[in-house]
Image: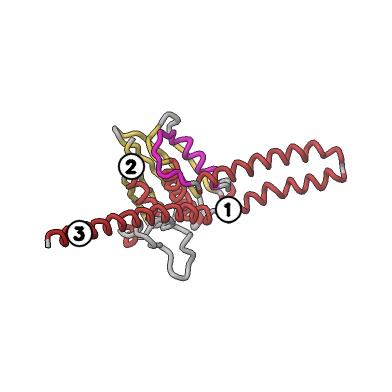
Amino acid sequence: MTTVASQKDETQQEKLHRLTKEVAALRRQLRQSQRLATVGTMTAMVSHELNNILTPIINYAQMARKNPALVEKAITRAAEGGQRATSICKSILGLARDDTGRSVCLHLAEIVQATIEAMARDPRRDCIDLTVKVPAELTLTASRAELQQVILNLLINARAAVLEKPGPRRIEISAQRLDKTVEISVWDNGVGIPPEHLENIFDPFFSTKGDDEDASQGHGLGLAFCRQAVESLGGQISVASTPGEGSTFTVRLPC
């Protein structure tokens, strides 16, 4: 009897171990899917910017064919546009990559700048005043891909929130070191979040939009992923919001 019970216990332990591994694998796949979904959300912005880059290149090339005096200018425009397009593509590929969650020492200001570049569209085109207040020397240890995804999701939500108002439109991302913690804040003066939604804003599949509206717009996009990613880095994420005045998302991570 003892031998049979022991064998049964071992089988249950093996099954538990297998299920634990499967859940961990599904979590990794879900995070990668969220990274790709975020990139997909940016497709419209990126496509618009690439079109803005390519259109003058094509126009100058066509004019240069008729007027050799414009050849030099056409080449210059092509080089500048090509470099800009390459920068956008590299930033997006950086977002889509899977770095297996390795934690390394990161300069936060560089991460924030790379994330803004990955959004491709200049905020000023949408009359958005984007301010960055991140000390150049501020560092922390984290997964680059995870941290960049969190910041990107918060910026995309902030952008959607301010676009719902006529203006002025303002977004500010700031950071500071507090003892052994780095605090990152993304503030916007957008439409804000209703009080009844604040409890659920980080729940999976929750959106402040109705069933007949585009759930990719406004607060709610990727916030469940943000919480999971931040917690996996040993940190916390919170939100404060006033309807009609704006929201502040705060991420606290260990140094």
Q: Give the number of the disc on residue 135.
A: none
Q: Amino acid at mark 3?
A: Gln
Labels 1 and 2: the sequence-earlier one = 1
State which mark lies toward you, 1 or 3: 3
| Drawn side of residue 61 relative to residue 45, left or right | right
Q: Residue at x 34, y 33 (%)?
A: 177
Q: Which residue is mark 3?
A: 7
Crowding at label 1, few (<14), some or many (≥20) Cα neighbours within 10 Å? Answer: some
SS for tag 2?
strand
Query: Residue 247, percent across and down?
Result: 39, 51
Q: Per the image, is 166 magenta?
A: no
Q: Give the number of the disc on residue 252.
A: 2
Q: Residue at x 83, y 43 (%)?
A: 64
**Residue nearer the viewer, 72 or 176:** 72
Q: Amino acid at mark 2?
A: Arg
The N terminus lies in quadrant? bottom left
| Drawn side of residue 204 relative to residue 59, left or right | left
- Please provide the residue range marked out in magenta: 98-119
**Residue nearer the viewer, 15 or 227:** 15
Q: Residue furthest bottom?
A: 212
SS for tag 3?
helix
Query: Residue 245, percent across and down?
Result: 40, 53
Q: Amino acid at mark 1?
A: Met
Q: As displayed, is residue 114 above or below residue 228?
A: above
**Which color mode does the image show?**
secondary structure
Q: As displayed, is residue 181 above or below residue 152?
A: above
The C terminus lies in quadrant? top left
**Residue nearer the viewer, 2 or 155:** 2
Query: Residue 188, percent across and down?
Result: 43, 49
Q: Which residue is mark 1?
A: 45
